[in-house]
Amino acid sequence: NTTVVLFTSDLRLHDHPPLRAALGAADRVVPLFVRDDGIDAAGFACPNRRAFLADCLTDLDEGLRDRGGRLVVRSGDVVEGVRAVAHEADAEEVHMAAGVSGYAHAREERLRTALEKDGRALRVHDAVVTALAPGAVVPSGGDHFAVFTPYHRRWSQQEIRGVLAAPRTVLVPDGIRSEPVPSRAEAEKAGGVSEGLAAGGEREARRRLTAWTRGGLAHYDERHDDLAGDATSRLSPHLHFGTLSPAEAVHRARAVGGPGAEAFVRQVCWRDFHHQVLAARQDAAAADYRPRHDRWRPETEALADIEAWKAGRTGYPVVDAAMRQLRHEGWMHNRGRLLAASFLTKTLYVDWRVGARYFLELLVDGDLANNQLNWQWVAGTGTDTRPNRVLNPVRQAHRYDPDGTYVRRWVPELEEVGGSAVHEPWKLPDDDRARLDYPGPIVELGEGLARFKEGRGTAG
Ligand code: FAD
């Protein structure tokens, strides 16, 4: 007999409960990926993620071939794609990972209904895309945690299941048609891919995890905010595409132990936290989680400021450096994300949705749960218990990029400005400043703060 495994945000062979279950239930398995045109229609696709995804699918196909199988690729409507393959393979069951977004929930429901109509069953597996399933950690009397600290406490007490080994063999039935596996070259030819985009795929994820646990992890607690040091794991795109299992990341870090590992596991817990918020409040992808006001500056009025922010020409060097890193790599340091998002929402007073949308156009780890809920956290409409805090980009720059190395790396116009003076080019002598092809600040910080306070006063 045959089963189908539908891969979505879990593009790996190690620690893969749906694949394990499918192999336990049948002697033949069809590993299926559907290039779902619904994802494009919903605006979730972008060139960087498409290119990274191509790497992931190529690697998954190679991993399956090493085990005697192959990946089957289809495109179009995901439900129709799965139905067709299940019919061709005469499969009784389809296995897949549970998702958290509204889109994922709707997909699951449509699949279940369609397959049942055909006399087949859909088996959905929890705790594949997160370390713990959203429903596994809930407060008494509620459906989800709205504050991180108590969530973290409870999450840390729960046991995370053991890591499942990758299967030795995966036998695929003959005669199942596949489209070509998308290639990175093809994705790059289509344009819009960041020059410094990282490589995807499970093998790359595992190589990175091993290097991380032997290297940077031990100092993560002290160094994670050092902008120039780049001392974070850069595992986020792998966790997003599921080339790395979050449960395995936690186990491997805990095996190393120490304050670095503890701080890292806490960040993976943040990821689970945002996923459980979105699973319970699917509308938080677009609507304010905690409605505070509706007085953001109209986009039309703030157009020039928004364009300067996107282009990395706000005149605040650390914000500009972060925005240019985003464009160049399709990735941004977490401290940069915090500063760039705080600047847009609390200094320029622009709606967080504008910023979140732009991040999703570029981020290789662009993720509905993590992106939207981090944006809301910064904007003060989300789960931050201090929603009115405003990050001062100058003070933050001195603190997290003390000698200006990060800024000079990404803003070549300021290359010649030595030391921390690079954070406040407006203080340079007139002659020196005039020689720089770099804009003055587009807004005074005091003016921005006043606008924020005024808006907050009208909070609903
Ligand atoms: P590390 O510091 O090595 O952390 C390890 C892992 O923990 C990360 O890979 C990530 O999966 C998780 N993690 C770390 N910080 C957070 C956090 N604050 N929230 C949730 N998970 C976290 N992360 C995304 O994965 N996708 C996004 O689209 C995204 N958008 C963001 C938007 C804004 C405005 C902000 C402030 C943060 C956003 N983050 C997002 C969270 C965080 O910035 C990135 O996960 C992190 O920078 C990725 O780098 P890393 O893998 O080296 O992280």
Image: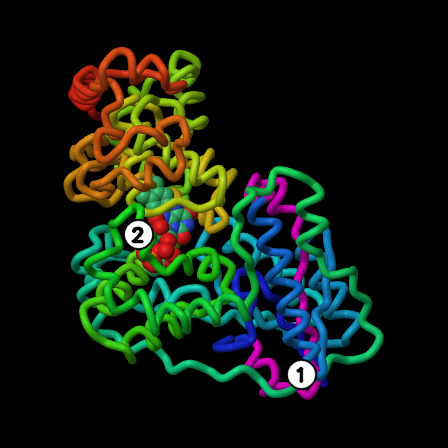
Q: Position of residue 254 (x, y in %)?
A: 27, 76
Left or right, 160 with reference to 100: left
Q: Quadrant of the N terminus?
A: bottom right
Kind of residue indicated by mark 2:
Gly
Left or right, 174 with reference to 111: right
Q: Position of residue 238 (x, y in %)?
A: 48, 61
Kindly tell me whether residue 281 is visible in this rendering.
Answer: no
Kind of residue indicated by mark 1:
Arg
Q: Secondary structure at mark 1?
A: loop
Q: What is the number of the mark on residue 229? A: 2
- Mark 2 residue crowding within 10 angstroms, few (<14) / some (14–19) / many (20+): few
Q: Position of residue 428 (x, y in %)?
A: 23, 19
Q: Which residues are magenta?
A: 19-47
In the current view of this chain or complex, which residue is farthest to the right? Answer: 175
Tell me which numbered mark, 2 or 1, is placed earlier along the sequence.
1
Which is nearer the eye, 129 or 80? 129
Question: Which residue is tagged 1?
Answer: 67
